[in-house]
Amino acid sequence: MSLNENNFQSTDELNATFAQSIVDILTAGINENGRASLVVSGGRTPKALFNTLSKVELDWSKVDISLADERWVETDDDASNEKMVHRELLQNNAAAANFVGLKTEHDNAKDAVETCTANLAKLHTPFDVLILGMGEDGHTASLFPCSEQIHQGLDQGARRTYLAVQPTTAPNQRMSLTLPALLNSKNIFLHLTGDSKKQVLDKAVKGGDEHEMPIRAVLNNADVELMWAP
């Protein structure tokens, strides 16, 4: 496990520095491969970062953007990660990016796994930048502890890329990238704010059952850059 901690005094400082790091990585990817990819998490924490990132100078037309997970609700629902990304990130300069969402017309996420997997071909892989969040229970993406699907989601021997998840501790069915798909990233960032999240992370770093705190599975198998502010 390699966790490189970047701690900032304020979220403004974090967002400015983080946005520039993302731009540098994506620019290098474009220069090397002609395209680059950015996979992000939803929720409230990244909104300000996305707003900052949307305004930076970058050849966004050569950037693919997608989600690490999605709540299985309509895309105009306030709980939709896609809606938040469109409002906060796919604006200003970043409006030129190629966005590949996870929500399909299927009523059940289980029926959409094959479609999501096929749509992955629209993204440049391996992902140049993956931005993960973490819940107070140690979940990341929509890999929730003690869910019926957690063993499948963390199984590195399986070839599945996406997994339909029914959380027992959160609303809405979900679609989530599996652990091996998350690990297929050149640069993995963990973006957290607040003391309580830092305390949860400190607990995860100390070790324990990955199925009880799925963020441990990422930390145990990848080099991760922590971007944290109070």
Image (spheres, rainbow, N blue to C red):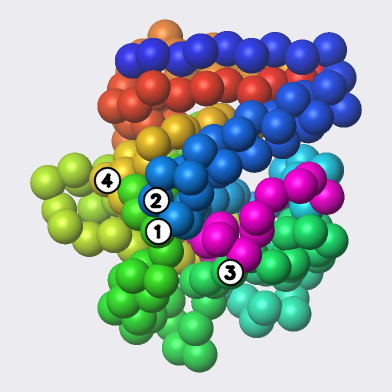
Q: CA distance from mark 4 to mark 2?
A: 22 Å
Counting residues from the start of the chain, the first of labels 3 and 2 encountered is 2
Q: Secondary structure at mark 2?
A: helix
Identity, as a three-letter code, of the amino acid under mark 3: Phe
Q: Are marks 4 and 2 in contact (CB under 8 Å)?
A: no
Q: Secondary structure at mark 1?
A: loop
Give the residue pinned by disc 1: 124
- Give neighbour class at mark 4: few <14, some 14-19, many 20+ (Cα, 10 Å): many
Identity, as a three-letter code, of the amino acid under mark 1: His
Query: What numbered label is drawn on residue 180?
Result: 4
Give the residue pinned by disc 2: 33
Whether residue 84 appears in this view of the structure is no
Depth order, front residue of 226/21: 21
Q: CA distance from mark 3 to mark 2?
A: 18 Å
Residue 201 quadrant: top right
Give the residue pinned by disc 3: 99
Q: On the rendered image, what quadrant is the C terminus found in?
A: top right
Identity, as a three-letter code, of the amino acid under mark 4: Pro
Q: Are marks 3 and 1 in contact (CB under 8 Å)?
A: no
The magenta segment is 55-71
For marks 3 and 2, give the one nearer the viewer. 2
Counting residues from the start of the chain, the first of labels 3 and 4 encountered is 3
Q: Residue at x 15, y 53 (%)?
A: 158
Query: What numbered label is drawn on residue 47?
Result: none
